[in-house]
Image: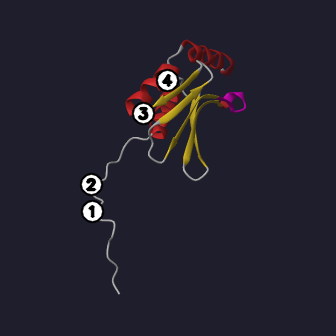
Amino acid sequence: MTSNNMWGDLSDLDIVRTPKAILIEQSMHLAEHTDGVLVGDVDEQLVGSSRFSIDLDILVPSLNNYRYTVLSARHDVELYPVRVHADRPPTSQKCDDEAAFIETVSAILSSAEVKTILSRLLSQAT
């Protein structure tokens, strides 16, 4: 007995950049710009059966792998909206699309608070 494809044509499915992929890109930039003294680490976990939880951490290998969570993002299987949380600067933002997510992440990563944390971690690591 032969099986029929009931999925239809899947060749036209859009492949989009996920919040996780965007955060991984930023983690690579951190390592590159600090010569590996500070390393970005992205950790994703499945919460329940349909929610994804992603943390962007700064990892300092020379300080016994000290870890500082810069931000957390939560979304369901549809990716957007994604909710972004950060302690510094205090942020709790719902992002309805990729552009809003990038804007929010950029505001957090380029903030004076995060730059101070980066400065202090670099000072201790060298």
Determine which residue is flagged by label 2: 12
Q: Which mark is residue 68?
A: none
Residue 72 or 56: which is nearer the viewer? Answer: 72
Residue 64 or 27: which is nearer the viewer? Answer: 27
Q: Are marks 3 and 2 in contact (CB under 8 Å)?
A: no
At x 35%, y 87%, the residue is: 1
Q: Considering only order in the chain, which callout, 4 or 2, is on the residue closer to the N terminus?
A: 2
Residue 8 or 112: which is nearer the viewer? Answer: 8
Determine which residue is flagged by label 1: 9
Mark 2 burial class by Cα count in 10 Å: few <14, some 14-19, many 20+? few
Q: Is residue 66 magenta?
A: yes
Determine which residue is flagged by label 4: 33
Q: CA distance from mark 4 to mark 3?
A: 30 Å
Q: CA distance from mark 1 to mark 4?
A: 43 Å
Q: Position of residue 104 (x, y in %)?
A: 47, 24
Q: Nearer the viewer, mark 2 or mark 4?
A: 2
Mark 4 burial class by Cα count in 10 Å: few <14, some 14-19, many 20+? few
